[in-house]
Image (cartoon, grey):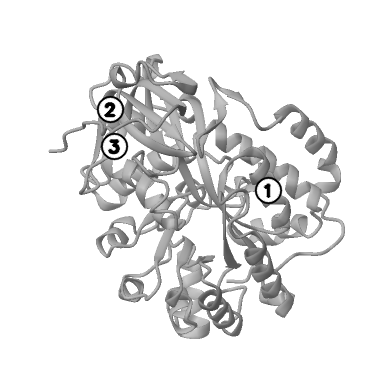
C-alpha cells in the first residue's frame, strides 16, 4: 500500500516564489502508484517544485505569493497530447459527417484559405480554453506554427509544437517543418519543445517519411504524426501497399526515432511487436471523444499498448472534430470506453486513468523527467481542483471523484513553471472577449470555401 506522505527538504533555501497550502496533493510512489497527501503544501522556487510538505511546515515560510487551497486537490497540470489548437476557429463547422466528407467537403477547403492571423486567434482562444480546463501543456501539429509559438510564449503555457506538412507540398514542406523545429526548440524559456510533423502515412509518401526519420536522428528531434487513425486507414494501407500504417513507419525508419502517434485506433495485434521493439521512444495519444463522433468501430488499444510498455497519453484532437479541448472529459471517457470494450469493470480504474493523465501523458510528449508529477525538482505545472461543489460530495474515493465526478470547470487555479495563469477562475494571460470579438468579425472570410481549393485530398 502506498503511504501518502509528503516530502520535506533538509532546509529551506530562502523565500519561496509561491506557496500553495492546505490542499490534498496527488502523489506517485517509487512504483508509480497514485496516492494523496492531505493537509499538504507545495513550495515553488525558480519555476520548480522545491518541496511537498505539510501545511503546518510552511506557516512561517516567506513567499512572494501564497494560495490558500483548502477544499482543493493539487494535480500535475493535464497534458493534451495531440491537438490542433487553431482549429477552435472551426468548432461546429462540420458536424455529423463521415471522416472523408469532413475532410474533403469542409475542413481542408476552409484550411486552404486560413491566414496567419486566423491561426493566431484560434490558438489564443484554444489556450484560454485549455488553461481554464487545467491543461498546462499541449502537443500541436498544424500550419503557421510561428504564430502558435508566439501565443504559447505570451500566454505562459508549455507546448510541443510541429509544423505539419504533406508530400503534395514537395520538399519545401519538409524543409519548413525542420526549420520551424530548429528555430523554436527551447523557445519561451524552454517551455516550447519541437517536433517534425509529417501529417500521416496516407498523405506523406515513404520517401518523405524516410527523409524525416533521417532528419529526426540527425537533429535529435521527435516526430509527431497521425497513423492508423482508424481501421479503414489500416485496411486501405494493407490493400494498396501490403503493409499496415505501423509497418510503414517501421520500414521507413520512423520507429527508430522518438515518435508520438496520434489516435492509433487502427493498430492491429500484429503491429504490437513492431512498436515494442522500436529503437526510439514510442507513444500513442488517444482522443476518445472524436473517435466516438466519427463512429470509428474500434478504439485505441490502451491495454495492449500498456502491456508492452508504450505510454498512452490523453488528447482531444482539434475542436473542429471533438467540439472541445477538454482533457478532463478525455480522462473519464478513456476509462469508460476501456471498461466497455474490454468487458471488465476493473479496467481502466480511476487510479490508472490518473496515471495516463499525468506521468504517461508527460512521457508521451517527451517531458517525462520534467512534468507529470508534483515532486521536488519537477517543473511547477500545477492545477487546483475545487471539490466543494454538490456534484463532488461526499468523497469516498478521491481518485474516482476526480475522474468521474469532477469537471474541467472545477479547476480553480492553473500554474505553469511557477507562474499563475488563472487564479480563482480568472484568466490572467489571455483577453478572451477581445479574441472572440475579432474572430467573430473574421468568420465570413474564414469559413469561405468558394475559392475551390483544398490543402489535401483525403482518400483512404
How many angstroms separate mark 2 from mark 3 (CA)? 12 Å
Describe residue 2's horizontal placement relative to residue 137 as left or right.
Answer: left
Sequence-wise first label, 1 or 3 = 3
Checking the image for residue 407, the label placed there is none
**Circle nearer the N terminus (2, 1):** 1
Asked whether 58 or 408 is in front, the reply is 58
Examine the rendered structure and indicate whether residue 125 appears above or below residue 370.
Answer: above
Image quarter (top left, top right, bottom left or bottom right) of the C terminus: bottom right
Mark sitting on residue 86: 1
Q: Is residue 39 left or right of residue 153?
A: left
Question: Residue 362: where, in percent of width, then height?
Answer: 42, 51
**Where residue 158 sits in the image (x, y, percent)?**
55, 46
Badge 3: residue crowd in 10 Å (few <14, some 14–19, many ≥20): many
Q: Are marks 2 and 1 in contact (CB under 8 Å)?
A: no
Identify the secondary structure beneath mark 2. Answer: helix
**Numbered label attached to residue 27:** 3
- Residue under the point 47% across and 50% down: 287
In the structure shown, which secondary structural element does the residue marked by tag 3 occupy?
strand
Classify the position of the N terminus by image quarter. top left
Report the side of 70 relative to 39 (left or right): right
Residue 287 visible in the shown view: yes
CA separation in Å, label 1 and label 3: 33 Å
Q: Decide which of tag 2 and tag 3 comes sooner along the chain.
A: 3
Contact, CB < 8 Å: mark 2 with mark 3?
A: no
On screen, residue 363 above or below 10: below
Distance (Cα) linking label 2 and label 1:
34 Å
Instruction: Check disc 2 and report the residue beneath it.
Output: 398
Amino acid at each position: 500500500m502506498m503511504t501518502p506522505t509528503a516530502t520535506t527538504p533538509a532546509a529551506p533555501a530562502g523565500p519561496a516564489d509561491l506557496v500553495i497550502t492546505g490542499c490534498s496533493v496527488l502523489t506517485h510512489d517509487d512504483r508509480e502508484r497514485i496516492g494523496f497527501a492531505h493537509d499538504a503544501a507545495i513550495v515553488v522556487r525558480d519555476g520548480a517544485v522545491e518541496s511537498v510538505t505539510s501545511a503546518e511546515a510552511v506557516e512561517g515560510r516567506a513567499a512572494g505569493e501564497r494560495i490558500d487551497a483548502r477544499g482543493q486537490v493539487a494535480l500535475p497540470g493535464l497534458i493534451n497530447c495531440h491537438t490542433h489548437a487553431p482549429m477552435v476557429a472551426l468548432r461546429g463547422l462540420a458536424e455529423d459527417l463521415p471522416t472523408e466528407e469532413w475532410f474533403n467537403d469542409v475542413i481542408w477547403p476552409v484550411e486552404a484559405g486560413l491566414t496567419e492571423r486566423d491561426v493566431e486567434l484560434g490558438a489564443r482562444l484554444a489556450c484560454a480554453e485549455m488553461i481554464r480546463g487545467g491543461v498546462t501543456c499541449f502537443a500541436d501539429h498544424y500550419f503557421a506554427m510561428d504564430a502558435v509559438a508566439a501565443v504559447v510564449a505570451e500566454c505562459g503555457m508549455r507546448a510541443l509544437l510541429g509544423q505539419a506538412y504533406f508530400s503534395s507540398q514537395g520538399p519545401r514542406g519538409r524543409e519548413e517543418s525542420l526549420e520551424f523545429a530548429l528555430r523554436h526548440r527551447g523557445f519561451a524559456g524552454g517551455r516550447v519543445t519541437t517536433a517534425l510533423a509529417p501529417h500521416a502515412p496516407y498523405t506523406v509518401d515513404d520517401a518523405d517519411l524516410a527523409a524525416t526519420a533521417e532528419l529526426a536522428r540527425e537533429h535529435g528531434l521527435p516526430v509527431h504524426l497521425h497513423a492508423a487513425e482508424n481501421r479503414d486507414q489500416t485496411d486501405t494501407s494493407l490493400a494498396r501497399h501490403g503493409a499496415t500504417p505501423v509497418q510503414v513507419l517501421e520500414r521507413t525508419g520512423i520507429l527508430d526515432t522518438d515518435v508520438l502517434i496520434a489516435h492509433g485506433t487502427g493498430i492491429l495485434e500484429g503491429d504490437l511487436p513492431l512498436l515494442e521493439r522500436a529503437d526510439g521512444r514510442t507513444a500513442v495519444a488517444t482522443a476518445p471523444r472524436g473517435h466516438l463522433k466519427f463512429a470509428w468501430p474500434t478504439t485505441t488499444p490502451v491495454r495492449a499498448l500498456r502491456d508492452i510498455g508504450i505510454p498512452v497519453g490523453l488528447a482531444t484532437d482539434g475542436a473542429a472534430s471533438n467540439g472541445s479541448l477538454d482533457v478532463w472529459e478525455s480522462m473519464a471517457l478513456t476509462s469508460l470506453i476501456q471498461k466497455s470494450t474490454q468487458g471488465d469493470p476493473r479496467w481502466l480504474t480511476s487510479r490508472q486513468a490518473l496515471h495516463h493523465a499525468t506521468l504517461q501523458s508527460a512521457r508521451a510528449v517527451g517531458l517525462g523527467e520534467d512534468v507529470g508529477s508534483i515532486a521536488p525538482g519537477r517543473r511547477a505545472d500545477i492545477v487546483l481542483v475545487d471539490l466543494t461543489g454538490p456534484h463532488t460530495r461526499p468523497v469516498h474515493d478521491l481518485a474516482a471523484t476526480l475522474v468521474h465526478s469532477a469537471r474541467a470547470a472545477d479547476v480553480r487555479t492553473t500554474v505553469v513553471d511557477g507562474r499563475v495563469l488563472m487564479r480563482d477562475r480568472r484568466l490572467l494571460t489571455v483577453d478572451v472577449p477581445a479574441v472572440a470579438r475579432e474572430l467573430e468579425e473574421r468568420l465570413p472570410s474564414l469559413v469561405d470555401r468558394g475559392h475551390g481549393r483544398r490543402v489535401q485530398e483525403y482518400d483512404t
